[in-house]
């Protein structure tokens, strides 16, 4: 019963790395047409390699997969394929992170990346009725100077980008390392967001809030270590984009039954459900909804609240939020 409710529930996805949607089948296809060797003989072999002990373990293989993306068409196909999955799961809106440095460091131009991705989002808006906004993420294992170069490269395409994010290896790369580039990004009109408290502790979340001024927290699990921080997040009305299957895949949480999502909801934190890197972590957004619902015995009201949060805490203008929430309310009343 709730499986059907989840399937058709209108929702938004707010934490999604486009490079993390790269399914092995498409990876093989693009590698072949670009004449690039990948170190796996089959789709099964790729899937078997997806066993991770921690975030870094995953990142190593994730950057390797992205190596086959060369042409604008590759970025288009990657993005459009994800957006088709959105349409099939009644994801009405998505906020897509992309990592320019993963590509520009290999000699692929910023323009190639952004053009392929943004053309796919425009076509999906028209053909699939899924809206998208783009979040340009800085890789935190690289220097702030490198992030500044990415900011500079993005400026001719500013009209296509809504926000900046911060991702990659968290431990040892605190938000404060990117203080100046975030300040400059905000000056250019980008909304500041960041991953914080996935493997890093609550101090990193404080820094992301107070030094970077972020308006949404990606993951944020370790905020629960600090009651003062929890109160501050609630006071600022900031959402946490939680990714259940990512958390178990990267061993941030040992078992979904011990996932803090319900605790977060009970405390009054605004949380949303997301897939993070669905091709690597065992499921798309609806699989995340189903898995956490069954592990924590979530009620229909909770699912409604999670979907509502996903629109409410999106980066859309309030008029658009209202339209989506109205659609959700109608669905909730009739199901
Ligand atoms: N954390 C940090 N960096 C990432 C992630 C993540 O979950 N996914 C892709 N890049
Ligand atoms: Zn992420």
Image (cartoon, rainbow, N blue to C red):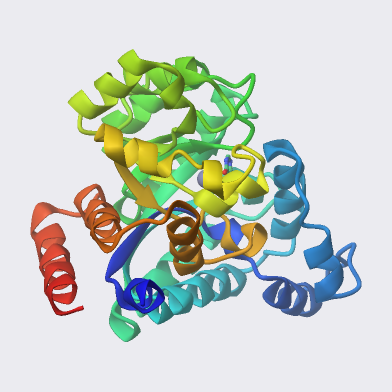
Q: Is residue 314 left or right of residue 47?
A: left
Asked if residue 277 is positioned above or below residue 56 in the image, the reply reads below
Looking at this view, is 257 or 214 the one in front?
257
Rendered-image quadrant of the N terminus = bottom left
Q: Residue furthest bottom?
A: 127
Q: How many marks?
A: 0
Q: Position of residue 163 (x, y in %)?
A: 34, 43
Judge by depth and name the residue closer to the eye, 184 or 266.
266
State left or right for residue 157 relative to residue 277.
left
| Vertical order, 297 against 136 (above or below) | below
Q: Residue at x 55, y 23 (%)?
A: 144
Classify residue 94 as left or right of residue 315. right
Task: Give the quarter the ligand 1 occupies.
Answer: top right
Residue 300, position in %: x, y? 27, 63
- Residue at figure coordinates x 51%, y 67% from the top left: 287
Left of 207 or right of it: where is 46?
right
Visible in this render: residue 334? yes
Judge whether 276 appears above or below 184 on screen: below
Question: Looking at the rendering, in which quadrant would you find the C terminus?
Answer: bottom left
């Amino acid at each position: 019963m709730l499986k059907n409710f989840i399937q058709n529930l209108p929702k938004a996805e707010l934490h999604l790395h486009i490079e993390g949607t790269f399914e092995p089948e498409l990876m093989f296809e693009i590698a072949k047409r670009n004449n690039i060797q990948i170190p796996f003989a089959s789709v099964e072999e790729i899937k078997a390699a997806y066993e991770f002990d921690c975030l870094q373990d995953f990142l190593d293989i994730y950057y390797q997969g992205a190596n086959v993306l060369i042409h604008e068409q590759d970025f288009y196909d990657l993005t459009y394929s994800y957006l088709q999955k959105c349409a099939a799961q009644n994801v009405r809106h998505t906020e897509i992170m992309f990592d320019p440095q993963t590509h520009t460091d290999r000699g692929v131009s910023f323009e190639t990346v952004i053009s392929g991705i943004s053309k796919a989002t425009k076509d999906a808006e028209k053909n699939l009725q899924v809206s998208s906004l783009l979040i340009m993420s800085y890789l935190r294992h690289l220097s702030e100077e490198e992030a500044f170069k990415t900011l500079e490269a993005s400026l001719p395409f500013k009209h296509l980008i809504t926000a900046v994010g911060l991702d990659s290896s968290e431990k040892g790369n605190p938000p404060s390392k990117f203080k100046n580039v975030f300040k400059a990004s905000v000056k250019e009109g980008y909304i500041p967001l960041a991953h914080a408290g996935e493997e890093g502790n609550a101090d990193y979340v404080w820094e992301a809030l107070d030094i970077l001024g972020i308006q949404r927290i990606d993951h944020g699990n370790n905020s629960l270590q600090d009651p003062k921080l929890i109160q501050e997040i609630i006071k600022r009305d900031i959402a946490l984009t939680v990714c259940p299957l990512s958390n178990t895949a990267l061993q941030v949480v040992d078992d979904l039954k011990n996932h803090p999502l319900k605790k977060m909801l009970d405390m009054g934190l605004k949380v949303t459900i997301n897939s993070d890197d669905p091709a690597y972590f065992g499921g798309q957004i609806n699989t995340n909804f189903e898995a956490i619902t069954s592990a924590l015995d979530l009620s229909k009201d909770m699912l409604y609240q999670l979907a509502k949060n996903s629109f409410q805490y999106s980066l859309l203008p309030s008029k658009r939020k209202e339209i989506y929430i109205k659609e959700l309310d109608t669905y909730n009343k009739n199901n």
